[in-house]
Image (cartoon, helix red, strand yellow):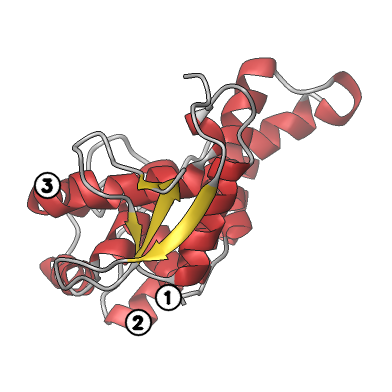
Amino acid sequence: MKRFYKMVSVEPRRKDDVDGFEIHLDGRPIKTQMKQILCAPTRPLADAIMGEWAAQGEQIIPDTMPLTQILNTKIDRVSAERDAMSAHIFKYLDTDLLCYRTDNPSAVGERQAAKWDPHLAWFEGRYGAALKITNGLAALSQDPAAHDAARTEVDALGADHFTVLQLVCGLSGSLVLALAFMRGAVSADDIFAAARVEETYKDEIFDVQKHGPDPAQDKKDKAMLYDLKAAQAYLTLLD
């Protein structure tokens, strides 16, 4: 889409008894695809989103505005679909990345244990429920106590934090990592490293430092880390 505005500004919300800060283009509020006003809950977040819009060139490129996209998801999807989104998130506990290991080659399994076991220990320490792990292909069924604890935590999240949780959960394939992220126990870089254990091993085998990465995998990795960093920035700007 061609850029159609000159000035970007932030204005306090003055209607509907809703606190927040609207982002305006040439004095008019931005609206989401569902025609809702783009309203950030904090001034720092609104200022950062204003910066994303101000930085656009002749063409508006949505992929360069991750904070805007996260806020859009909150306003348009979470407000209308949270129950369905929650149900989808809770399925991750039985298929959590950290619980499915390999023993062939053994070096990968050892790296998985070294990288993932501390996160599972964090989950057990916080929620009082240990998660099962497997080297097989059959789906696990985690203890109901683990599900109950995760559900209680997720249900208590406000809309903004829930939006970030579901994003991180989908990116990492791990509800454990997403919950740890929300509690500040892991960073975007930590999640990226945990999600790439097998890929990191392959990089070493094929000497990526010398020969360069696979272009498709490199693009995928950069996009994932970009989105994780945006999720981290969004949380920081909420405070």
Say which of 232 and 37 sits in front.
37
For label 3, the SS is helix
Say which of 143 and 119 sits in front.
119
Q: Residues within 10 Å of mark 1 (few under 14, many from 20)?
A: few
Say which of 27 and 219 sits in front.
27
- Say if residue 120 shows up in the picture: no
Mark 1–mark 2 Cα distance, whole angstroms, equals 10 Å
Residue located beneath label 2 in the image: 126
Indicate the quadrant where residue 19 lies: bottom left
Residue located beneath label 3 in the image: 81
14 left or right of 134 in image? left
Looking at the rendered image, the disc whose residue lies closer to the viewer, 1 or 3, is 3
Indicate the quadrant where residue 158 lies: bottom left
Q: What residue lies at 56% left-to-right and 37% top-to-bottom?
A: 6
> Is there a contact, CB below 8 Å, between mark 1 and mark 2?
yes
For label 1, the SS is loop
First of labels 3, 2 by sequence position: 3
Q: What residue lies at 48% left-to-right and 31% top-to-bottom?
A: 62
> Is there a contact, CB below 8 Å, between mark 1 and mark 3?
no
First of labels 1, 3 by sequence position: 3
Residue 108 against residue 178 in the figure, above or below: above
For label 2, the SS is helix
Residue located beneath label 1 in the image: 183
Disc number at residue 4?
A: none
First of labels 1, 2 by sequence position: 2
